[in-house]
Image: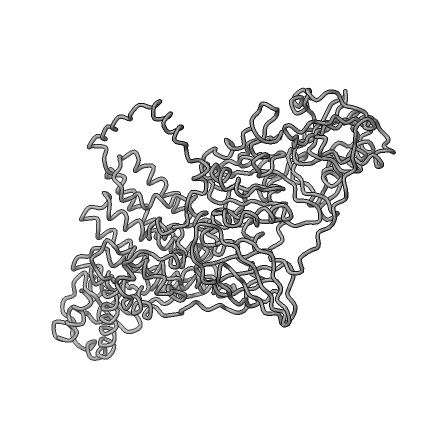
């Protein structure tokens, strides 16, 4: 099959590839390009460490996507990590390709004959899997087998979280087929041990093998004779890769024949046919003719392999795998076998570096060593010209320090670790840096975040229907799929977390950030983004849409040079094609959303905010999910207000949705009674509620690094500041803006210098100086509250004139409320902001700011300042 076409099949956002060898430049310039064309945004490559690491190191300086658009996880083991699998997972379908192909040019672009194009002779079997089938359970089980092979706990956590975010999680408890068709072997059972049970009682006369290589002992053939009684074995293999030792074959209890190939092209496929008149069977996949591949598990020094098992087969279906042009097989004694020298064991480097991971949003670099350094050793990481000291996280082989001074370049970053042992300095191997924030951004692109930005576009009504469908899907993911928004992809697991919290470069309060942003020079805010600033704050999903996709300057097409057309090709295509005709403009009646579509958008937003406030969301959401979900209604409101969705009359409705979302997030204190236990509690603002849950789980620093980086804070303030408000709603808008500005949890790890370019980016369309406005409003409301507190007892004794709907009330500890509807006997329905609900109250318990202002000039001036 054509693996490039397989990878380009559309709408499969998750991809898992396993390989023994890898050509990283070929992968980035061809395979990654094809996967991206098929919609892949979350990509894992598992490769044999001994084979992959030297290839990666030799390509240093030429790789641009490693650790940024895909994860490569080296697998170390006694034997070899040898499976060749490509799994693609879509929304409701999966594709699997299993065979003999490595992630190299010759393996991936394989051929079956001399005239079949470039590459090796390879064999690959592909099939599709739908949910709810035994095959789905089989796929899930095999991927879990691979998870257990990953040495670093954080890698296992990340890979598991990826699986949980797909429909395959539903197959966790499904019943496996009694005789799986495809499997990953060597973790718990070898291929041989499985077949012994599966084919128990069967006998075969001949074993016919085509293989990429052999071992010295013919161990697999001896096993087939002992287990299934074969009397003849025929092995087809390239002469150069036939490693049988004549001395080891002398005592074979069966007739062995060998057909040697000329190696043009190289035969790399692997298939074993067990032939019998009573019924034949076959095994096709990655397993060569060796004891390591067939007989031993990884714990016993064997390989990890992936094969497809045919319990019954028609031998004619496999005829094309064998080369008839290479003559007849010969008795092994007549074949010029040359014993291969036993490879010498490489001397292991004293200190090896397994992993370097950078989390720009937290300003952290983490190094995972293969073994702990000696007591008293000083540990440093070196990336580019930056050298930083690392501190132990509590685990002896996991060390962490501040982000080095890095200049952003298109190429993947590489680094190493230095160990100062007192009298000497030891250097580890060089490895690449996994850029966790860039990986998270790439993974997030598989969700339809783009639909939010498209709200401001002018389209025909049919396209708006698809747009609303995408928004509905996105809102469901934001509310109910925490696995889609992992907090720290690739970070160490909970047990590996550092006990020493790394402080941000400049920890500040919300008030400090406002002052700092206002002081930063206008040329700094308005100028182009310096490379050091790009990525200083993690921009994913909604944030990427709001702050502008062009901020990610390193997000380039790694395959541009590979696929650039020649001048001759362009000229030829230009001559073959006619000039395109101008497209016909759509009919005027079809342009813009219909009234029903506008109504649906508002209904979706209101429903989202209601479900967003439910206790179940606070109990399960991840911090990054909360960040994205909080920004969602605000972003939708911003882009909808710029486009054809909102009439002048609808703006107040949109503003109310924004204020309602802010109320839930930042300043509600809602009493609640458990219907089962009768217990009473007060639900804090949603951000505080989730942060308290994280603190109870010992993960408060994770929450602060994500939600407290300042991006959500800017989005909320920007949404409120730019939301048009008439004189009747301006006080409510400004009060919400003030409350958010003072909410410190949104800025615990914010660095004003990092936020300054984003301020300009978010508010570039506004002539309003938002930071100055926020400063003035905070001062105005604080002055109003202080004055009202000092005079409340005096004012409450005065008679209240006729109240009106819309009047603002105030009371100590309760704060502000607004009259919604007047009732009899001095009562009214009032919306109490701190409780985020409307309740009937007695008006005499509050002071009416409009009424008192008529008799108090200072109060009138303070209230007027809050309406500015």
Name the foreground residue: 858 vs 382.
382
Does 12 appear above or below 61? above
x and y percentages locating residue 88 in the rendered image: 52, 38
Q: Residue at x 51, y 66 (%)?
A: 388
x and y percentages locating residue 461 in the rendered image: 27, 35
Please indicate whether residue 586 sits to the left or right of residue 354 in the image.
left
x and y percentages locating residue 729 in the rendered image: 20, 59
Q: Is residue 206 visible?
A: yes
Q: How is the image coloured?
A: one colour
Q: Is residue 153 visible?
A: no
Does 165 appear above or below 804? above
Name the foreground residue: 800 vs 131.
131
Quadrant including the N terminus: top right
Q: Residue at x 61, y 26 (%)?
A: 112
Name the foreground residue: 333 vs 555.
333
Q: Quadrant of residue 108?
A: top right
Q: Quadrant of residue 787?
A: bottom left
x and y percentages locating residue 403 in the rendered image: 47, 63
Q: Quadrant of residue 341?
A: top right
Quadrant including the C terminus: bottom left
Does 609 appear above or below 390? above
Please indicate whether residue 305 sits to the left or right of residue 477 in the image.
right
**Number of numbered discs:** 0
């Amino acid at each position: 099959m054509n693996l490039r076409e397989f990878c380009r099949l559309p709408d499969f956002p998750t991809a898992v590839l396993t390989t023994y060898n890898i050509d990283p430049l070929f992968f980035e310039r061809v395979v990654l390009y094809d996967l991206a064309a098929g919609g892949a945004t979350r990509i894992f490559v598992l490769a044999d460490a001994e084979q992959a690491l030297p290839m990666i190191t030799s390509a240093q300086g030429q790789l641009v996507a490693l650790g940024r658009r895909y994860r490569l996880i080296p697998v170390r083991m006694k034997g070899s990590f040898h499976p060749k699998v490509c799994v693609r997972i879509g929304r409701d379908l999966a594709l699997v390709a299993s065979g003999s192909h490595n992630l190299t040019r010759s393996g991936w672009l394989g051929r079956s004959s001399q005239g079949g194009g470039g590459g090796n002779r390879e064999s690959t079997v592909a099939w599709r899997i739908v949910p709810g089938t035994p095959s789905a359970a089989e796929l899930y089980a095999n991927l879990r087998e691979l998870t257990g092979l990953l040495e670093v706990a954080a890698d296992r956590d990340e890979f598991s979280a990826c699986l949980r975010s797909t429909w395959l999680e539903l197959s966790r408890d499904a019943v496996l087929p009694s005789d799986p068709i495809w499997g990953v072997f060597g973790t718990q059972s070898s291929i041989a041990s499985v077949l012994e049970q599966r084919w128990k009682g069967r006998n075969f006369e001949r074993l016919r093998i085509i293989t990429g290589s052999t071992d010295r002992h013919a161990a697999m053939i001896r096993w087939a004779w002992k287990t299934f009684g074969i009397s003849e074995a025929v092995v087809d293999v390239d002469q150069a890769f036939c490693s049988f030792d004549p001395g080891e074959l002398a005592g074979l209890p069966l007739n062995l024949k060998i057909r040697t190939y000329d190696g043009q092209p190289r035969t790399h496929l692997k298939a074993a046919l067990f032939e019998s008149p009573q019924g034949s069977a076959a095994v096709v996949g990655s397993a060569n003719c060796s004891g390591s591949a067939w007989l031993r598990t990884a714990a016993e020094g064997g390989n990890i392999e992936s094969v497809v098992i045919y319990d019954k087969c028609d031998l004619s279906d496999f005829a094309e795998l064998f080369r008839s042009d290479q003559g007849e097989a010969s008795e092994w004694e007549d074949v010029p076998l040359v014993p291969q020298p036993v490879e010498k064991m490489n001397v292991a480097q004293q200190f090896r570096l397994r992993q370097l991971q950078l989390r720009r949003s937290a300003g952290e670099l983490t190094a995972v060593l293969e073994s702990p350094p000696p007591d008293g050793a000083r540990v440093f990481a070196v990336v580019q010209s930056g050298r930083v000291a690392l501190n132990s996280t509590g685990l002896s082989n996991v060390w962490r320090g501040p982000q080095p001074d890095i200049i952003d370049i298109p190429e993947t970053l590489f680094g190493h670790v230095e160990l100062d042992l007192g009298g000497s300095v030891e250097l580890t191997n060089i490895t690449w840096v996994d850029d966790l924030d860039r990986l998270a951004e790439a993974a997030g692109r598989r969700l339809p975040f783009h639909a939010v930005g498209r709200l401001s576009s002018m389209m025909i009504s049919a396209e708006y229907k698809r747009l609303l469908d995408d928004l509905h899907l996105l809102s469901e993911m934001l509310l109910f799929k925490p696995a889609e928004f992992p907090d720290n992809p690739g970070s160490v697991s909970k047990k590996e977390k550092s006990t020493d919290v790394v402080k941000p470069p400049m920890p500040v309060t919300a008030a400090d950030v406002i002052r700092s942003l206002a002081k930063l020079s206008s040329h700094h805010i308005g100028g182009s983004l310096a490379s050091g600033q790009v990525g200083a704050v993690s921009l994913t999903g909604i944030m990427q849409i709001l702050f502008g996709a062009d901020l990610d300057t390193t997000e380039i097409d790694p395959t541009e040079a590979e696929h650039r057309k020649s001048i001759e090709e362009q000229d030829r295509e230009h001559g073959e094609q006619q000039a395109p005709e101008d497209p016909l403009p759509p009919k005027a009646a079809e342009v813009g959303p219909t009234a029903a579509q506008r109504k649906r958008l508002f209904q979706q937003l209101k429903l989202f905010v209601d479900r967003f406030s439910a206790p179940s969301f606070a109990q399960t959401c991840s911090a990054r999910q909360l960040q994205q979900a909080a920004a969602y209604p605000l972003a939708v409101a911003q882009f909808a207000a710029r486009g054809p969705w909102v009439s002048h009359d609808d703006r107040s409705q949109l503003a109310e949705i924004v204020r309602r979302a802010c109320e839930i997030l930042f300043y509600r204190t809602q009493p609640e009674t458990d219907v089962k236990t009768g217990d009473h509690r007060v639900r804090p603002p949603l951000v505080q509620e989730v942060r308290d849950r994280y603190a109870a789980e010992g993960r408060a620093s994770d929450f602060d690094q994500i939600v407290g980086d300042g991006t959500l804070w800017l989005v909320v303030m920007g949404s409120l500041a730019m939301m048009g408000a008439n004189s009747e709603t301006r006080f409510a808008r400004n009060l919400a803006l003030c409350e958010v500005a003072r909410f410190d949890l949104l800025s615990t790890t914010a660095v004003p210098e990092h936020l300054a370019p984003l301020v300009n980016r978010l508010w570039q369309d506004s002539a309003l100086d938002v930071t100055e406005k926020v400063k003035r409003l905070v001062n105005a409301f604080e002055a109003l509250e202080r004055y009202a507190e000092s005079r409340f007892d005096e004012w409450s004794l005065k008679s209240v004139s006729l109240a009106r709907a819309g009047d603002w009330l105030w009371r100590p500890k309760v704060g502000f409320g607004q009259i919604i509807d007047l009732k009899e006997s001095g009562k009214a329905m009032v919306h109490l902001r701190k409780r985020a609900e409307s309740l009937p109250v007695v008006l005499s318990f509050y002071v009416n700011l409009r009424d008192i202002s008529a008799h108090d000039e200072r109060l009138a001036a303070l209230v007027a300042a809050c309406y500015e």
